[in-house]
Amino acid sequence: MNLLPIVETFHSLQGEGYWTGCSAFFIRLAGCDVGCPWCDTKQSWSQKLHPWLSIEALVQEAVQAQPQFVVITGGEPLMHNLEALTQALHDRGLPIHLETSGAYPLTGKFDWMTLSPKPFKPPDPAIYPHVQELKVVISSPADLQWAESQSRLVSPAIPKYLQPEWQKLQSLSGSYLVQYIKDHPQWRLSLQTHKFLQIR
């Protein structure tokens, strides 16, 4: 299929996780049925609300931006077959990162995969061996148990992040999350720095 439903495309800095601060071109695909109640991109859930754009047009935009890498995100991007899009981007020499909940089978070829698993619709078990980065959103202390259960399913060598849910983010100094990471040094803290900078 040569068309994909697109919420937005934009050139910015990666705001989260291992690649924070790097030049990235984002392709945000529409469609998600994971249903996170605190989702900050609920406008992406319905495919019917967004235009379908050609892979050729998306690749041309990405090439013109000249980013360090392209990020395919959503919504839940793996609801779509990403083979043609990733092949076209790689043909133009662009590294590709995927941000996914892992709720659907993997399609496409990526240079980096960030898994952000959600208890509302857990990942496909076949996803875990392909992950280069684990990032778990923390809305309450109970989410730490989910984070630990997911960390046991990925390689011990990959970076693992706990990211406070934005709407509940207050002063982190002395918070349970900071203390947890101090006590469990296999975890790192991820913040949505693009929101602090007020950029996309």
Image (tube, rainbow, N blue to C red):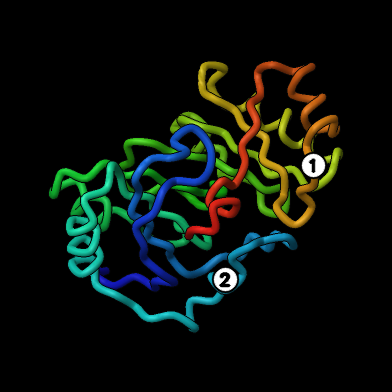
Q: Please name the residue shown 25% across and 65% down the image.
A: 58
Image position of 84 with respect to 99: above or below: below
Q: Please name the residue shown 66% across and 32% down the image.
A: 150
Helix, strand or loop at mark 2: loop
Dividing the picture into quadrants, the one containing residue 3 is bottom left
View extreme (front): residue:
197
Q: Which residue is mark 2?
A: 45
Amino acid type for the residue under numbered disc 1: Ser
Tell whether 19 sits left or right of 142.
left
Q: Residues within 10 Å of mark 1 (few under 14, many from 20)?
A: few
Residue 8, image x, y percentages: 41, 69
- Quarter of the figure with the N terminus: bottom left
Helix, strand or loop at mark 1: loop
Q: Which residue is mark 1?
A: 171
Residue 70, image x, y percentages: 32, 49
Amino acid type for the residue under numbered disc 2: Trp
